Amino acid sequence: MASNNSTQQFSIEQGMKLEDSANKVEVLSAMALLEVEKNPSSQKEPFRLINEAIRTAKKISNNEYLAMAYNTKAIIFREFSTFSQAVDFHKRALKLAEKLPQQSEKINFLLDLGATYRVSLDFENAKSSFEEAQLLAHELQLPSFEIIACLNIGFLYTSLEIQEESLVYFEQAEQIATEHKIKDAYILSIIGKGIDYSLGSNPTLSKAKKYFVQAVTSSKKNGNKYFEGISRIFLGRVYLRMNKISDAYRQLSSSVKLLEKYKYKPVLKQEYKSLDDVMKFRNYYSQALSYLNSVKYYRGEISQSQYNAAVKEELELFGNPDQDELEQLRDALSELKNHYSFLDSINQLDEEEAVYLLKNYLDQQKKKVNTLESDRSYLKNLLIETEKAAKQKIQILEQKNQLQQALIDKQYWAAASLLLLIVSLVVVGGLQYKNATQRKRTNLELEARNERISEQNIEIRSTANQLEEALTSLQTQSKKTEESIHAGWRIQNAMLPTEKLFSDFFSAHFVMYQPRDIVSGDFYWVGQKDQCTIIAALDCTGHGIPGAFMSMMGNALMNQVVNIEGLTSPSEILAKIDKYISQTLHQEENVWSREGMDVAICSIAHDKKSLQYAGAKNPLLVVKENGEHQFYKGTNRHVGGNRMKNKQKTYKEHNITIEATDTFYIYSDGIQDQFGGKENKKYMRKQLIEDLCNWSNLPLEQQKENMVHKFDKWKNGSKQIDDILLIGFKC
């Protein structure tokens, strides 16, 4: 043990003495992370190493390696649960990465920042970081990084038990991995689906099993023993929960054999490190071993002492992974073992022997009960006799005591009367003196207290007057603020399209528009240019006053781009508005400015019976006469928000042929994100689509009434969490 320590110390000192260079920064950064892994309780060596790496990078003026060192220091802070410092160093790394020609490093830093936010339970910022990494990877055509970002978002939704969203991202990762033939990422996306179905309040173990079997098959086919071992652990755990002990045993045995060579260091590409806090790649061998030893003990293959020794060895080697789940498993297996031992002993007898054995057992129990009843009766009689004898003795003693007490009482009362007379005289005199002194003292205290009360009353009246003046001032300010907000509401409502404008352009329509506050971040726009009718549903960042400011900007930009510049293509309109927002809010320089909007735009050429749609996050739903529907997803990026320097965002455009009976719906995410119902869950997109399809044959005004009624019932008195916008129209 001592020699190992000296070797370790020597190698660290060798690294510290390297010539100042990029290689030294890289070596020290790697050594710092290794020290954290080897000794998680000690912070001294990791920070000494990484601080020297940062000093070296600054000295040689190498921003690329300085950014890498900053990011490594952030990861070290995260490992020691110092999250605010971790986020600070991630952001320093990102700021330097903006100036680097290789933008792939920025993606790595964004993924690591997202992982830090996730570990600190800041899920909103984690999602934003992963989404930004996904967008950048897509623009730079780096599919591996795009997949990792999708997997991270998927696992984020898994931890929140929002299965509908997590599966979307796992399927997106699977699709990209299949398209680009990235085998490791494909297997991880399949494992992600399996984990998703195996967790939560209502796990679907049959589906989880299906995906883990698929992951095992794919890993085996590709010769990836590491991922095969991981997949077999998950499959074995599912079999245990399905009470298929033999199947679980086979999978866990295979997993231990496959993962044994990786037990101290997993073979995994560096780019997957942002997934480590959810996938726990370092712990899989110890997990497989723990589960296997538990199953072996249950099957009787090892004794209690052997099992305890194995558990002790696991803890010494690997720590305590997933201990709660393992303890539950071990308790359950122990209980099962006792139960099945009893059943095995019964099953070994034929029917006649079993009947005889049970009859014998019942006879023995009856004898025990009869014996207890007999003993109980004897004790009861003995108790009654004892009580009678005791009562007689008590009566005799009481008579003797009464005679003695009468004599004592006479002597006592004579002495007591004399003593009482003396004491009374002393007490009365003392009380009179004490009362006189007390009255004098009390009068003095009352006078002083009355003076203090008078002074306090003056102070209270003064304070009350000040509070009343402050309250009046606040009420005046509040009234002015409320009047200003109502004035903003009138201005905002005045800019919205009128009913007449809708009627001029559409054969039928409805608009469900319910701001969360007085003013709204959602708004809608209708106009016409070059024989094309343009309709848009826009959801600006925030709600209330901040959202209203963005909506005013959005309305002005729609007028500028369509009415003045003459654009009618939805994708071109979105790209132009994105550019204008970024310029107006200086988002090219300020990477942390996230203000923007989600948009759905349709451009309708009535004479050609065609509709063009493009969306920034917001979708288009087309419902046919028979209730069937087509769902068009928007491009997975906002209009505005973070913008890459000199990079123009693009938005996918769909061309749709219009049929007379088609009904079109565009909307923001307010309805589907609203919490309510019996279980206080989100309304969800699936339910919204089902409702609109079910009502598609009703008049559009009736559809609106149904939606408003169901939405209010769903909220059930809960607070509305976002602005609501839903538009239905026929061409």
Image: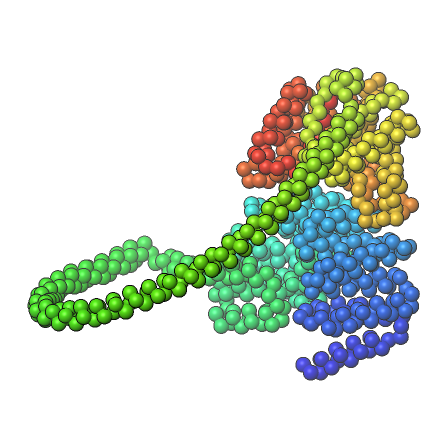
* Residue 130 in picture, x, y percent from top left: 75, 50
Front position in the image: 555 or 643? 555
Q: Quadrant of the N terminus?
A: bottom right
Above or below residue 709? Residue 618 is below
Q: Quadrant of residue 548?
A: top right
Q: Is residue 430 left or right of residue 640?
A: left
The residue lying at 83 percent from left, 69 percent from top is 53
The residue lying at 56 percent from left, 34 percent from top is 716
* Residue 453 in picture, x, y percent from top left: 53, 53
* Residue 454 in picture, x, y percent from top left: 55, 51
Front position in the image: 644 or 384? 384
Above or below residue 9? Residue 443 is above
Q: Quadrant of residue 252?
A: bottom right
Q: Is residue 517 left or right of residue 421?
A: right
Q: How many marks?
A: 0
Q: Quadrant of the C terminus?
A: top right
Above or below residue 678? Residue 42 is below
Q: Quadrant of residue 598?
A: top right
The residue lying at 49 percent from left, 62 percent from top is 298
The residue lying at 77 percent from left, 17 percent from top is 500
Visible residue check, residue 612: yes
Q: How is the image coloured?
A: rainbow
Front position in the image: 513 or 12? 513
Q: Is residue 337 left or right of residue 435?
A: right
Visible residue check, residue 270: no
* Residue 213 in picture, x, y percent from top left: 63, 51
